[in-house]
Image (cartoon, helix red, strand yellow):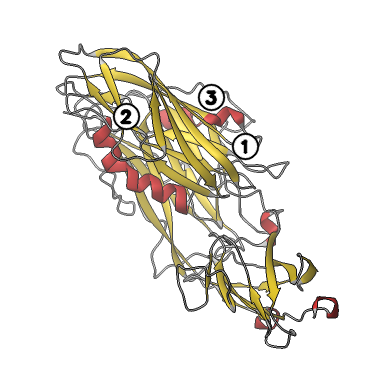
């Protein structure tokens, strides 16, 4: 059974992007307003068969500030000349020097990620199979990083003939509920999941991960697992921001066809549960993700006083080939990353903006700034706001991010009477402890400024509705000092 990194990349890249965009993992909190760059290889990225390999990775910024000048360096100097290296396709951001590939990623905003395929690997004629060094990827930026330990990822290189037996973990998971039985703040649900080895060799070491949507948090705290989230804990009072993701390593063998349920089939007791907070948006169908991928033991030290996940798993039965857990919600999945759904009840948010503050911005120009705030209780999807210039003035944004000229989607003109802008998603409540969403704009004064200036904001997304429209609009009236 052939399992090259090209096979893995094609089957998992789209799911990896979903994981990054919808539910990216991140540290619980940050003491400073800094980026947190992370790089991770796709599963099986270092396995090279006769067709070659297209090793992929994902680069993330899980910090509280944008990362600029981001580069990824892949060092293959420990890989001998049995493996030939070339830049993947017409890749304009990556360059090869000797056996080192460097990619200029540029800027990564907060809570964003980018899939990257920096190179292709092929085998020299007659290349002998076996281990062959490692690919070491390192990500760096202009600023200091919250967690430098996550800036490097290593993928062992192994040459295969394509006939070797390989394990193939399948992530099986059930939706947490149904549209007819929606969940809301204060409730909890078990996460029914299992891992099946669909390959033709034993699966001896693997990682399982559960990623919940924002507004849900994992209940259990296993001392031998790693927990993370986009946002801090939310300060209590029923808000749920941490942890939304857990990663646990298992060094337990699964023979071909065997299934390991992460719950007791007899009692229905699950190893993972989700608790929902006041900030859970709805009504909506929110996505989660269950992952099971081969992984060498990361030798993660035990932390805290909680129970051991590995010991809890050892008390569960391993089901023989052809046997499926009965009496639970239907488990689904046919690959290593499987999405599941959480159906939520209606909720409301209070999106508002602060009074604009003006400042000089050069001859004939006035700058102003304001903050966008979500007073909750629900989180929001991307927040859209429209800035309309007072008569006699125009907005002169140069390279305004996430903005376009009103009536010209995708286009930002040098001068605009009005701009339509959006924030990244999600837009959490102020309880998430994120940095203020401060927005800055510049007005060029063409004639005596008049009326008509305003800023209007609204939350978006399927779930949750506005509870107080009166604070969603501010007049934009220039102070007399800014008038000609």
- Give SS at disc 1: loop
Task: From the image, state whether disc 3 or disc 1 is nearer to you.
Answer: 1
User: In front here: 373 or 241?
Assistant: 373
Marks 3 and 2, Cα distance to the nearest angstrom?
Answer: 21 Å
Say few, some or many: other residues with alpha carbon within 10 Å of mark 1 (under 14 / 14 to 19 / 20 or more): few
Q: Is residue 258 toward the left or the right of residue 433 in the image?
A: left
Of mark 2 and mark 1, the one earlier in the sequence is 2
For image coordinates 62% across by 42% down, the residue present is 35
- Give SS at disc 2: loop
Evaluate if marks 3 and 1 touch, with contact meaning CB atoms under 8 Å apart. Answer: no
The N terminus: image quadrant: top left
Dot label at residue 159:
none
Q: Is residue 48 toward the left or the right of residue 125 in the image?
A: right
Evaluate if marks 3 and 2 touch, with contact meaning CB atoms under 8 Å apart. Answer: no
Instruction: Name the quadrant containing residue 306.
Output: top right
Task: From the image, state whether disc 2 or disc 1 is nearer to you.
Answer: 1
User: In front here: 482 or 182?
Assistant: 482
Judging by the rendered image, the residue that carries numbered circle 2 is 44
Evaluate if marks 2 and 1 touch, with contact meaning CB atoms under 8 Å apart. Answer: no
User: In front here: 293 or 398?
Assistant: 398
Q: Is residue 446 toward the left or the right of residue 320 in the image?
A: right
Judging by the rendered image, the residue that carries numbered circle 1 is 142
Q: Residue 469: image x %, image y %?
A: 65, 82
Judging by the rendered image, the residue that carries numbered circle 3 is 300
Q: Residue 373: image x %, image y %?
A: 68, 66
Q: Residue 210: image x %, image y %?
A: 45, 44
Q: Residue 173: image x %, image y %?
A: 35, 48
């Amino acid at each position: 059974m052939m399992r090259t990194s090209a096979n893995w990349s094609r089957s998992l890249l789209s799911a990896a992007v979903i994981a990054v965009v919808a539910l990216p993992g991140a540290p619980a909190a940050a003491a400073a307003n800094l980026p947190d760059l992370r790089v991770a290889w796709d599963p099986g990225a270092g396995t090279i068969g006769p067709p070659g390999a297209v090793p992929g990775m994902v680069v993330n910024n899980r910090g509280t500030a944008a990362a600029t000048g981001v580069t990824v360096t892949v060092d293959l100097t420990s890989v001998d000349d049995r493996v030939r290296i070339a830049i993947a396709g017409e890749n304009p951001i990556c360059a090869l020097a000797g056996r080192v590939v460097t990619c200029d990623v540029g800027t990564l905003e907060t809570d964003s990620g980018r899939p990257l395929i920096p190179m292709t690997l092929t085998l020299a004629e007659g290349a002998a199979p076996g281990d062959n060094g490692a690919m070491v990827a390192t990500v760096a930026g202009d600023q200091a990083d919250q967690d430098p330990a996550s800036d490097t990822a290593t993928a062992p290189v192994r040459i295969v003939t394509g006939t070797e037996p390989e394990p193939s973990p399948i992530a099986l998971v059930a939706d947490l509920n149904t549209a007819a039985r929606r969940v809301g703040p204060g409730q909890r649900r078990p996460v029914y999941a299992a891992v099946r080895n669909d390959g033709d060799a034993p699966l001896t070491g693997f990682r399982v991960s559960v990623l919940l949507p924002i507004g849900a948090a994992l209940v259990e705290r296993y001392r031998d697992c790693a927990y993370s989230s986009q946002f801090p804990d939310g300060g209590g009072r029923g808000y749920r921001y941490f942890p939304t993701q857990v990663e646990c390593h298992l060094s337990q063998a699964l023979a071909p066809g065997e299934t390991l349920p992460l719950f007791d089939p007899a009692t229905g007791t699950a190893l993972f549960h989700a608790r929902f907070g006041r900030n859970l948006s709805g009504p909506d169908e929110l996505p989660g993700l269950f992952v099971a991928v081969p992984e060498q033991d990361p030798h993660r030290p035990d932390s805290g006083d909680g129970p051991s996940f590995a010991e809890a798993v050892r008390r569960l039965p391993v089901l023989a080939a052809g046997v499926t857990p009965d009496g639970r919600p239907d488990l689904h999945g046919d690959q290593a990353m499987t999405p599941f759904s959480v159906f939520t009840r209606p909720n409301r948010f209070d999106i508002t903006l602060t009074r604009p503050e003006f400042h000089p911005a050069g001859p004939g120009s006035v700058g102003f700034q304001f903050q966008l705030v979500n007073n909750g209780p629900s989180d929001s999807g991307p927040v859209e706001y429209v800035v309309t210039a007072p008569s006699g003035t125009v907005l002169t944004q140069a390279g305004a991010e996430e903005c376009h000229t009103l009536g010209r989607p995708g286009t930002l003109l040098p001068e605009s009477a009005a701009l339509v802008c959006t924030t990244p998603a999600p837009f959490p409540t102020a309880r998430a402890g994120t940095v203020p969403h401060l927005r800055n704009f510049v007005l060029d004064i063409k004639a005596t400024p008049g009326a008509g200036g305003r800023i209007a904001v609204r939350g978006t997304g399927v779930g949750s509705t506005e509870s107080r429209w009166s604070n969603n609009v501010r007049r934009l009236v220039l102070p007399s000092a800014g008038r000609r």
